[in-house]
Image (cartoon, helix red, strand yellow):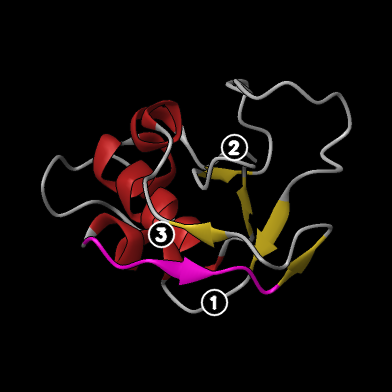
Amino acid sequence: MPICPQCDLELDWCEHGLQATQKERASSATLLISPRGMAHFAGCPHKGDDDDDFALWATLEAPAAWSRLGNGEEIPATGGQRPDLVASPRCSNCIEHGPWS
């Protein structure tokens, strides 16, 4: 098991390894776009829009989409029920806690 050069713990158990894992997962994750245009990671517990089954949502599969949205870029949906949606802001719960496994 690789050891973290910053804290001498195994990378699977240190905060630096966790950050690297989350960054890697975020860069390749499929995002969901709410009807209001907010980007979420799949599994986000914050679903503030009023629909029960994601029928009004879209999906976004684009390289580094999460980072690009954080830099202010607007990215159109690539699939889902509402391909007309455009992602702009990122969900604050997902920024703090995502992506969920």
Residue 100: give x, y in percent of width and height: 59, 37
| For residue 28, above or below residue 15 | below
Considering the image in quadrants, where does the N terminus appear? Answer: bottom left
Q: In the rendered structure, which segment of residues is drawn in magenta?
A: 72-78
**On residue 66, which mark appears?**
3
Tell me the amino acid under the disc marked 3. Trp
Residue 40: give x, y in percent of width and height: 55, 42
**On residue 11, which mark appears?**
none
Q: Give how far apart the Cα atoms at labels 3 and 2 are.
A: 14 Å
Q: Secondary structure at mark 2?
A: loop
Mark with earlier residue (1, 2): 1
In the picture, measured across the screen, residue 22 lies left or right of residue 34, that is left
**Pointer 3 with pointer 1, Cβ within 8 A:** no
Q: Residue at x 27, y 55 (%)?
A: 70
Can you tell which of label 3 and label 2 is closer to the viewer? 3
Can you tell which of label 1 and label 2 is closer to the viewer? 1
Q: Secondary structure at mark 3?
A: helix
Which residue is the site of mark 1?
62
In the picture, measured across the screen, residue 82 lies left or right of residue 17, that is right
